[in-house]
Image: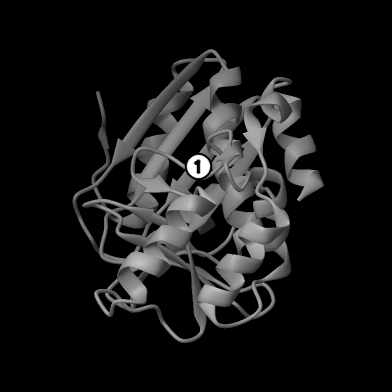
Amino acid sequence: MDKLVTYASTFDPTFPSRIRGAGTEEIERLQDLAGHVLPQDYKEYLSLMGHGDGGALSSTEICTDIAEVIAFYEENVATGEDEVPSDCVVIGVGGVAVQQLYLEHEAQGHVFDGADGEKLRLWSESFEKLLHQQIYMQYRPNQLAHSAFYATSDRAPVFNSARAAAIRLGFAPEWFSDKITFCGERSGTVLVLNQLEGQGLWVRIAAERVEALPTIAQSIAEASGVVLQRSA
């Protein structure tokens, strides 16, 4: 997890000053409530960012503060109001759009959003990849002069086609890309693709030349067989 902090610091040197770790007793308390050993990468995350992750994963939609996660176990799970999948630990609690985030407790476990003890949509193939994806999407496109978001309301599963098109266009995938999110670059242009199950394809493009944005979007749309609309 130190590598994540170093990576985030290449974009934002103030990042280390904006994170706050959890104490050993808190981590052990959460482990006791979860009923099984916490994944090692999650424990490292908690020790460095358990009370503040600098926006690496926490947002207005999901809270990853260990105090809130412990409260969820004590007030919701222990009382039977909520359940947690037997192979997962809760790593975030939210609101309407995202109720909980689950991390499978096996090594390199997948991350899902969910509710009432049911995994709903795969968010990432691993916790480590998800954190790096979030940092990349938060900072890297903003380093370029022009940026745009595109999306489709068509919920057909087209991520694989979009990803194949991106690679044909010369975008080299970052190591943390997976079957939900593609992050790639080619000579001064950034491309991010994302499609959760049951949702439409989401695209972000950033480039030094503004005319590159619609051209790339159109290529991705044609290869995927969907209509991409630019968001305001």
Quadrant assignment for the C terminus: top left
Colour logic: one colour
Which residue in the protein does label 1 denote? Answer: 192
124 or 223: nearer the eye?
124
Q: Amino acid at mark 1?
A: Val
| Vertical side of 104 occupied by 190: above or below | above
Instruction: In the rendered view, tell whether residue 45 sits above or below residue 216.
Output: below
Q: As displayed, is residue 33 above or below residue 86?
A: above
Q: Position of residue 55 (x, y in %)?
A: 53, 35
Give neighbour class at mark 1: few <14, some 14-19, many 20+ (Cα, 10 Å): many
Image-based side of 224 in relation to 17, left or right = left
Q: In the image shown, does 184 or 167 lie closer to the viewer?
A: 184
The picture places residue 136, in percent across and down from the top left corner, at: 60, 38
Residue 19 picture quarter: top right
Most extreme residue toward the bottom is: 86
Left or right position of 153 against 89: left
Label 1 sits on a secondary structure element that is strand
